[in-house]
Amino acid sequence: MSYSPDLAAALSGASMGQLAYWRTGRTAEPLLVPENYRPHSPVHYSFEDVIALRTFVYLRGRDIPLQRVRKAVRNLRRLGAVDHLSAYRLVPAGRDVIWVESEDQAHDLTGMDQSHPVLATMIDVLSTFVTSADRTVVDLRRPNHGIEVDRAVRGGYPVIEGTRVPYDAVASLIEDGVDLKDIGDFYPVVTPRSAEGAVEFAIYVSTYRNPSNAA
């Protein structure tokens, strides 16, 4: 299962403009090209892409300049890190970016020496946080009441909590005029309260469809 750009934006906190800017090389090397991107095909993001995007949004929200984020990714690769960027814990330390490799080993990716030990504040980019635009990013695991995201369920696509029912399948029924109290006629496992959460989350996703500033 993959995410459309607007859903990836809503789950990561990146604007649509940022997503477009970060996946192109207009000014420098792309920061993050979607994992399964194919030229001239619709853009879709993976679960791992969204986690990496949340890391970048978090770093930008802690006043880390975009060029330093790019430098951090570049130096991470130079240190031999070849897995998907979501596999690495990158955290801010002042205006530098630190790669926390293990509990007792970390690397300054933007300072003069990428090999010396450093101290960094541990973060959880899956939890809610505030962006540089002062916008609150939802908790990835539970982006709204009644909605959950689990990598093991539909590849991480948002579903009604405790089910495999996609949130947008429920939201579209409500949008088409089905009453909340009647949602069980279509999906017996979905409660009116969860359906309400699906509608709220669909509205939240829609707020990300308008492009914003790129950086």
Image: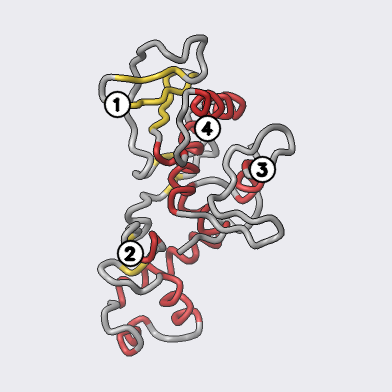
Residue at horizontal 27 percent and vertical 84 percent from the top: 188
Instruction: Residue type at mark 3: give it.
Output: Tyr
Establish if 156 lies above or below 34: below
How far apart, in angstroms, are the residues tagged by discs 3 and 1? 31 Å
Horizontally, residue 150 falls left or right of residue 81, namely left
Q: Which mark is residue 102?
A: 1
Classify mark 3: residues with Cα within 10 Å, few (<14), some (14-19) or many (20+): some
How far apart, in angstroms, are the residues tagged by discs 4 and 1? 23 Å
How far apart, in angstroms, are the residues tagged by discs 2 and 4? 30 Å
Which mark is nearer the camera, 2 or 4? 2
Mark 1 or mark 3, which is nearer the start of the sequence? 3
Which mark is nearer the camera, 4 or 1? 1
Would you name the residue on which mark 3 appears?
Answer: 21
Mark 2 or mark 1, which is nearer the start of the sequence? 1
Q: Secondary structure at mark 3?
A: helix
Q: Nearer the viewer, residue 164 or 190?
A: 164
How far apart, in angstroms, are the residues tagged by discs 1 and 2? 28 Å
